[in-house]
Amino acid sequence: MVDGKVAGLAVVSRPEGYADVHAKLVRSYALEALLRGTTEAPAEAQPALQAFLERLPESTSETFPAVGAGQDLRMVGKGMVGSALAVDGRPAHMALFASEGGGGEEPWAGRARGLFRHDAPPGRGTG
């Protein structure tokens, strides 16, 4: 939550994987809050997060072979962009970010690619 709104959500399937990205996640959301001039935490995050997640099934997606192992899934939906990695048919991680428009590749959406090196489709780089 940044400025009372969902900024994004990261889901990592294993504690060791989360430990690898924890510092990056904290820095990313802290920088977002600083850039927006946020000074207060939201009173209640649950309703906003629930509404954000309810839009996920309505998103469109494309699947690509991952640069490393598994399949890379790219999602675009109303007010969100994201990526996920599945290895051996099981989700390894997912990163969703709120977008200001109706979806699509916002200028800052490369943040999703920057958190997890292996989630860029061939030819698109790593953010």
Image (cartoon, rainbow, N blue to C red):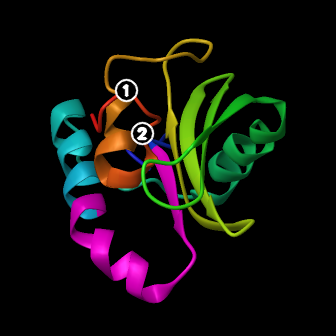
Which of the 4 image quarters holds residue 34?
top left
Q: Secondary structure at mark 2?
A: loop
Query: Residue at (77%, 36%) from the top-left corner?
Result: 55
Q: Secondary structure at mark 1?
A: loop
Assign the magenta stretch its main secondary structure.
helix
Residue 59, which numbered label? none
Check if mark 2's residue and mark 1's residue have beta carbons within 8 Å.
yes
Amino acid carrying label 1: it is Arg
Say above or below: 31 vs 10. Answer: above
- Front-lying residue, 64 or 52: 64
Tell me residue 3's x, y (percent). 37, 40
Residue shown at the point (31%, 68%) measured from the top left? 21
Q: In this view of the protein, which residue sits in the foreground, 33 or 21?
A: 21
**Residue 124, labelled with which disc?**
1
- Residue 122 left/right relative to 45: left
Question: Which residue is found at the position 83% from the left and 39% from the top?
Answer: 57
Query: Residue 120, which numbered label?
Result: 2
